[in-house]
């Protein structure tokens, strides 16, 4: 049976990925990390659940202690595996460490993070990856990742697209890794965030939308506070769909978190590692305080497309609902790993999640896992 190593397998994202792969039963798992006891506890839980799954032969699941900062130990693990799912973080600190170890060990890789940053770092490995016929998939998460799958799938029904507008909305108790990467990415977001696509070119947002605006999102969110979040991924979506215009926003319903995030951005804390670390820790704390207000509403991706369908102008709103962002990210990375293990993925090379897993397959698989998808269409909008 194929073997999959999940680095950070006992974390929020890793445990979701491990649960999905155990449910499928097509690969033996290593739950990996520096804390052997935490890995063992996760293995015990997964094994108990697996015994109740009588549809498929149960996969084995073992704890494995490894520090990714030890290249020799990491290569020793990956040389025995077919796929590694890297659920460790922050990406800004790990960089290309796991990716290079995977290639040296002749092991496929799926990374919920990675983003464009890591893809550029390992461009020098493209020939070696091609030679070894490996698949290295990055940004296999909820944002980026599934956030592109939704509008790309919806766009298929339109013969011409006038506009795309996307919202990434949620309230989470954020992890240190995710917040560290968020702060590090503020330099790029400062450049791209206050942008829009207009006449198929990136241009500045209207001044009234450069900081916050107040859209009305589907329930249970309702009227929300949105900040511009124009990313490279969204820019690729606009270009791929040939939309004339596009806008993208991030919504976090926690007032303390939103205020702190704005302060971190305005003071430029992302420019120095020391202040990046402090900011990440502060954002984790305020997100936890927001969560104590007991009004957490889960995580929602909303894409609205206006264009021509069946010869008529119409608007379709797609709504994808998750219990939290970690569930979506864990499922995305596990779905991709499963397709590699079973030989269903044929996309060799170094690519992002939307390039390696067709949007319609992503959404269909999510629905099988109980994730709710809703579409609302109106003519003449």
Image: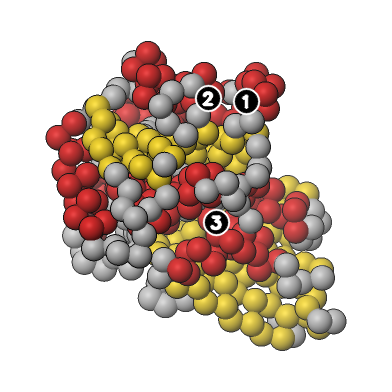
Residue at image position (57%, 72%) is: 318
- In the image: residue 164, left or right of residue 361: right
Question: Is there a contact, CB below 8 Å, between mark 2 and mark 3?
Answer: no
Q: Nearer the viewer, residue 137 or 147?
A: 137
Q: Nearer the viewer, residue 154 or 220?
A: 154
Mark closest to the chain's N terminus, 2 or 3: 2
Is residue 215 among the parts visible in the rendering? no
Question: Is there a contact, CB below 8 Å, between mark 1 and mark 3?
Answer: no
Q: Quadrant of residue 28?
A: top left
- In the image: residue 35, left or right of residue 307: left
- Could you tell me which secondary element the residue under label 1 belongs to? helix
Picture coordinates of residue 250, whole percent (x, y): 49, 56
Distance from disc 1 to disc 3, alpha carbons, whole Å, reads 30 Å
Q: Mark 1 highlights which residue? A: 132
- Could you tell me which secondary element the residue under label 3 belongs to? helix
Of all residues shown, which one is farthest toward the top?
72
Q: Give the quarter of the figure containing the N terminus.
A: top left
Q: Mark 3 highlights which residue? A: 147
Q: Nearer the viewer, residue 80 or 66?
A: 80
Q: Mark 2 highlights which residue? A: 106
Question: Is there a contact, CB below 8 Å, between mark 1 and mark 2?
Answer: yes
> How many numbered badges does the structure rendering display?
3
């Amino acid at each position: 049976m194929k073997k999959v190593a999940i680095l950070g397998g006992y974390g929020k994202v890793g445990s979701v990925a491990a649960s999905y792969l155990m449910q499928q039963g097509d690969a033996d798992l290593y739950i990996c990390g520096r804390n052997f006891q935490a890995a063992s506890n996760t293995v015990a839980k997964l094994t108990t659940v697996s015994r109740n799954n009588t549809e498929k032969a149960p996969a084995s699941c073992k704890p494995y202690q490894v520090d990714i900062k030890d290249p020799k130990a990491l290569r020793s693990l990956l040389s025995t595996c077919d796929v590694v799912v890297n659920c460790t973080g922050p990406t800004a600190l790990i960089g290309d460490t796991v990716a290079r170890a995977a290639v040296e060990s002749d092991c496929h890789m799926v990374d919920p993070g990675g983003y464009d940053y890591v893809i550029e770092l390992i461009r020098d490995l493209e020939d070696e990856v091609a030679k070894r016929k490996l698949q290295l998939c990055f940004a296999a998460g909820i944002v980026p990742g599934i956030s592109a799958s939704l509008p790309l799938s919806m766009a298929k029904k339109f013969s011409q697209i006038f506009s795309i507008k996307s919202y990434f909305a949620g309230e989470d108790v954020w992890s240190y890794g995710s917040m560290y990467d968020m702060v590090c990415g503020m330099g790029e977001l400062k450049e791209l965030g206050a942008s829009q696509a207009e006449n198929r070119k990136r241009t500045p947002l209207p001044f009234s939308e450069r900081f916050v605006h107040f859209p009305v999102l589907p329930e249970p969110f309702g009227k929300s506070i949105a900040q511009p979040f124009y990313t490279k991924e969204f820019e690729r979506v606009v270009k791929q769909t040939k939309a004339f215009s596009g806008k993208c926003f991030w919504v976090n319903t926690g007032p303390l978190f939103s205020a702190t995030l704005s302060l971190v951005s305005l003071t430029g804390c992302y420019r120095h590692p020391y202040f990046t670390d402090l900011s990440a820790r502060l954002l984790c704390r305020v997100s936890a305080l927001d969560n104590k207000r007991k009004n957490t509403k889960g995580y929602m991706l909303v894409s609205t497309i206006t264009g021509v369908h069946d010869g008529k102008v119409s608007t379709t709103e797609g709504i994808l609902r998750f219990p939290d962002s970690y569930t979506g990210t864990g499922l995305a990375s596990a779905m991709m790993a499963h397709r590699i293990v079973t030989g269903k993925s044929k996309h060799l090379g170094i690519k992002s999640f939307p390039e390696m897993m067709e949007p319609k397959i992503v959404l269909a698989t999510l629905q099988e896992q109980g994730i709710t998808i809703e579409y609302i269409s109106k003519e003449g909008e």
